[in-house]
Amino acid sequence: MGFAQTNPAGTGLNGKNFGAGITNGLISISKPAGLIQLYLTAGAYNFPNLGQPFHSASTALQDFTALPSAYLTIAPLSNFSVSIGQLPTLIGYTGTLDYNRMNIEGGFPWTIQPSFSRGIQINYSYGPVSASVSWNDGYFSNRYNVISSLLTYTINQENSVSIYADGNTGHTGTVNDVSTLRFSKNGYVDSSLVYDNSNIYGLYYTYSGSNFTITPEVQYMYTPINWAFGTTQSSNDISAMIHADYYLTKTWSIATGVDYEHANSTGEGTAATGGYFGYGAGSSAIGVIITPTYVDNGYLYVMNSLMFISPTIPPVSALVIGLTSLETS
């Protein structure tokens, strides 16, 4: 993937205006049928993210290793199964890997969601309703005290609505020095204990027609007062998106997205997270993405994205031009 970005920050690729990196040098192996099922994804990867500097694949590997997804599923019934291992999150609509997204970049709701978690997950469906519940380690914290859930109602072949929730049943770690507040390995949510000790609630609706798909999503994150954890003031963030994809021909499509977030953070939460998204306490931001995509018989993918982010506090805009992904499968 090649990229150009303004306002770079940090070292390595995220500190450059121009560069290139690996996004999906992956091999996937699956056995999706039978009583015992297996799913493995291994290799080099990256998580392009709206409003954040471009990170290298090596950074992502430090977060989730070279085997980001590896789990076993036991399916004794067609509508009931149990999965155990390193699982993709139940939280949110946007896929963790960019080839599972409409746009290359994950939007604002995705930014503060877990990506992969280690744990156990129960799945059940009955008619138009499907539900999954997971006991896991949240933001890859290696502390198994988080419950995640997803409930989906399929209205018809083209329409569905989903609600999700995620929360810590106790607390993870303690706040002693926010300057060294590092516990979870998930660098894409600031590697912060604040996220590990927060609750997420969200809702998204999906319409998927023959040549058009659209998904609006709204999400609320709440970091409660937790004396054991060490926070004496609560914080919260609301984020929302509308992402859509229109298929012009069998090979060409154009996706777009509009995202919004507002961080109402205070106290320890502000010091540790920079206002959840790193834009500062009480900040808001709007992001816009446009992604034309070319697909050749399912083997070659070429995606080009243009995104613009405008945080209100501090008053700085960030522009990324020509974020290009070339993928084969």
Image (spheres, grey):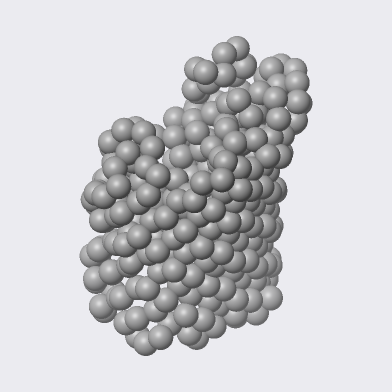
Above-or-below relation of 266 to 116: above
Counting labels gives: 0
Which residue is at a point 48% across and 75% down the rendered structure image?
245
Q: Does any portion of residue 66 appear in the rendered image?
A: no
Quarter of the rendering containing residue 127 = bottom right
Image spot of residue 188 (x, y percent): 46, 39
Please indicate whether residue 154 sits to the left or right of residue 100 in the image: right
Observer-nearest residue: 140 or 112?
112
Res 209 quadrant in image:
bottom right
Identify the residue at horizontal 28%, vertical 36% (top origin). Answer: 12
Q: Of residues 150 and 4, which is closer to you in this image? A: 4
The residue drawn where x is 26% and y is 56% is 1
Q: Quadrant of residue 56?
A: top left
The quadrant of the image that shows the C terminus is bottom left
Identify which residue is drawn at 25% across, 78% down. 296
Whole-percent x, y for residue 67 in the image: 33, 41
Whole-percent x, y for residue 8 in the image = 37, 42
Identify which residue, 61 or 260, lies in the foreground.
260
Across and down, in percent, residue 255 comes to: 45, 72
Q: Is residue 326 left or right of residue 194?
A: left
Q: Is residue 82 above or below residue 60?
A: below
Above or below for 87 versus 187? below
Q: Is residue 217 visible?
A: yes
Q: Along the horizontal axis of the image, is 329 left or right of 176?
A: left
Considering only vertical position in the picture, is 220 above or below 324? above
Return the residue found at the far front.
315
